[in-house]
Amino acid sequence: MFLRRQPPSAILLRGLRSLTTSTAHNEATASLKRSHLYVPAASDRMLEKSLTTTSDVIVYDLEDSVPPAEADKAAARNRLAKFLQRDDLPPRERVAVRVNDISTPFFVDDIAAIASSKRVGSLVLPKVHAAEDLDVVSQALTAANRVVSNSLDLIASIESARASFNLGEIAGWKAKDTLGGTLTALLFAAEDYCADTSILRTPTRRELLQVYALFNRHCSQSVPVKRHRHGLCQLQGPGIFGGGMSRWATAGLHGKGHFTILFAFRVSQETAQQAIHPSQVDVIQSTFVPSSAEIERAAKIVAQMDREHAANRGATGLDGEMIDMPMILQARKILSIARAANLEIPEL
């Protein structure tokens, strides 16, 4: 029995219809996580001020910004736990907490106090060296969440040579229990990595290009997870550049008595940047969005596709260039980001 081979136009049309269906939900529910602003849990004033930030994500910090004494850690933990009970907090997807790492005596108490909160959407996990470290976190979360059935997104911080060696296993990790969390992002902590490897930092950051390439590859090749359909989110540290160089902004950001240089590189919807001062947020969020020219071209591609689709035609072109499914997918993604960022999209 012979099957009649379909013409390429019919195959493309079928693909376009499937693409239209599969992207509709993603466009309607798109949420941006371009900026992650760190807020010390040791300060009542900063906790209160965090409620006014426009940062896509607020990371309440129990780790580096809190003095290492046991009394200070306990005070910050209790302060944050009480703060997280407020009714005027941002939506859950905007709230994250960085706990102390699993090797410290503070980790278990941090998880017990924070993980069951319905107001927290993500946990930032410092000093993840191997997939086994995530197993430890997952077991602690599962135990803490048995009563409240609260599943959290996990952001694993890559800070050492050992972690970079195990990056593939870390990126591919999955919890044995849904209550044990879902790995949704990898964070590259460049300063910690350089300290661990004795790499000397230079203004060009060229010494880290190979590490960034490795980081980018494992994020993009990871199994897609919820809200990140193309793999793990890449979260870059403040004062360094991200995993790609399609466009960048360099800004001198003045705070009270300090000067910070922020390099922000836009790569994709799955790329984000950390901030350590509120004045950095606007620079990050204006960088990690499409340009007006990109939005206009994306709108033209989608409009042209819709016209061809309505005429029951599969093959199409724009400005002398063949438009295929990958280009349409990218165009829809650009428009999804633009809508989430409240950017103007031309009507065509």
Image: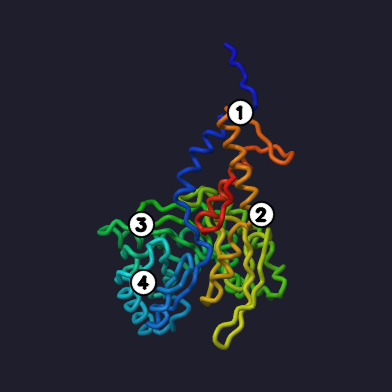
Q: CA distance from mark 3 to mark 2?
A: 39 Å
45 is higher (above) or lower (below) than 232 = below
Whether residue 188 is visible here, answered yes or no, is no
How many marks the image carries: the answer is: 4
| Camera-side residue of 226 and 343 | 343
- Separation of residues labelled 2 and 4 (CA atoms): 46 Å
Q: Residue at x 34, y 82 (%)?
A: 75
Residue at numbered disc 3: 151
Which comes before the other along the chain, label 3 or label 2? 3
Of helix, strand and loop, which one carries label 4? helix
Vertical placement of residue 307 versus 202, above or below: above
Left/right of residue 42 with respect to residue 116 in the rendered view: right
Where does the image place residue 345, in percent across and percent down from the top left?
57, 52
Q: Which sits earlier in the primary sequence, circle 1 or circle 3? A: 3
- Measured in 3D between alpha carbons, the distance from the residue under mark 1 to the one under mark 3, in whole angstroms, is 44 Å
The amino acid pointed to by label 4 is Asp
Q: CA distance from mark 3 to mark 4?
A: 16 Å
Residue 245 in percent (x, y) is at: 68, 60
Report which residue position mark 2 lands on: 293
Q: Nearer the viewer, residue 111 or 245?
A: 245
Q: Is residue 135 left or right of residue 88?
A: right
Q: Earlier in the sequence, mark 1 or mark 2?
A: 2
Tell me the residue that label 4 is attached to. 110
Which quarter of the figure is the N terminus placed in? top right
Label 2 or label 4, whichever lies nearer to me, is 2
What residue did someone put label 1 on?
A: 313
Residue 274's disc is none
Tag 3, which secondary structure?
A: loop
N-term-proximal mark, 3 vs 4: 4
Measured in 3D between alpha carbons, the distance from the residue under mark 1 to the one under mark 4, in whole angstroms, is: 57 Å
Q: CA distance from mark 1 to mark 2?
A: 27 Å
Outermost residue toward the left? 147
